[in-house]
Image (cartoon, rainbow, N blue to C red):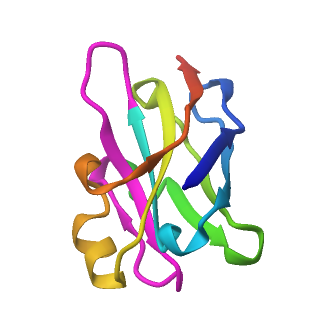
Amino acid sequence: QVHLVESGGGSVQAGGSLRLSCAASGYTNSMSCMGWFRQAPGKEREGVAAIHYGGSSPVYVDSVKGRFTISRDNAKNAVYLQMNSLKPEDTAMYYCAAVSASSNYCYTFGLLVPRYNYWGQGTQVTVSS
């Protein structure tokens, strides 16, 4: 089992920044591919970014490219999402997720909700205009 706990959400004005953290515990071999997802009210959950254990070739949804950066600290079993130049449309509940997968799998499928086995409870991000 893997337990994921997100933190770092909050309310900011457009153009501001937030850094989300996800602390993982449990069977770490199941966390080789980790992703960030978000869900706005009335919308489906969407993949934001994903990164493999080695940290190379992270993948991002087009709407956050150049603004968000995913990173991980394997020694701390943690993954982060640095969010800059935030927009009102970034407002959502943000979730951390994990799955055991190869780097190629993580890059190819890492933004797809059904590919993940473990999910955190989420942290709210609200961006005002």
111 vs 84: above or below:
below
* Residue at the image point whose x is 35% and y is 75% from the top: 101
The image quarter in which residue 78 lies:
bottom right
Nearer to me, 79 or 16: 79
Residue 119: where, in percent of width, then height?
A: 47, 44
Residue 53 among those drawn in magenta: yes
* Residue at the image point whose x is 55% and y is 42% from the top: 85
Residue 11: where, in percent of width, then height?
A: 67, 21
* Residue at the image point whose x is 61% and y is 49% from the top: 3
Nearer to me, 66 or 32: 32
Residue 21 among those drawn in magenta: no
Count numbered badges in the picture: 0
Does residue 27 appear left or right of residue 63 in this picture? Answer: right
Image: magenta residue range: 39-63
Does residue 68 appear left or right of residue 123 in this picture? Answer: left
Does residue 5 appear left or right of residue 34 in this picture? Answer: right
* Residue at the image point whose x is 35% and y is 14% from the top: 41
Nearer to me, 110 or 86: 110
9 vs 99: above or below:
above
The image quarter in which residue 90 lies:
top left
Q: Residue furthest right?
A: 76
Q: Quadrant of the N terminus?
A: bottom right
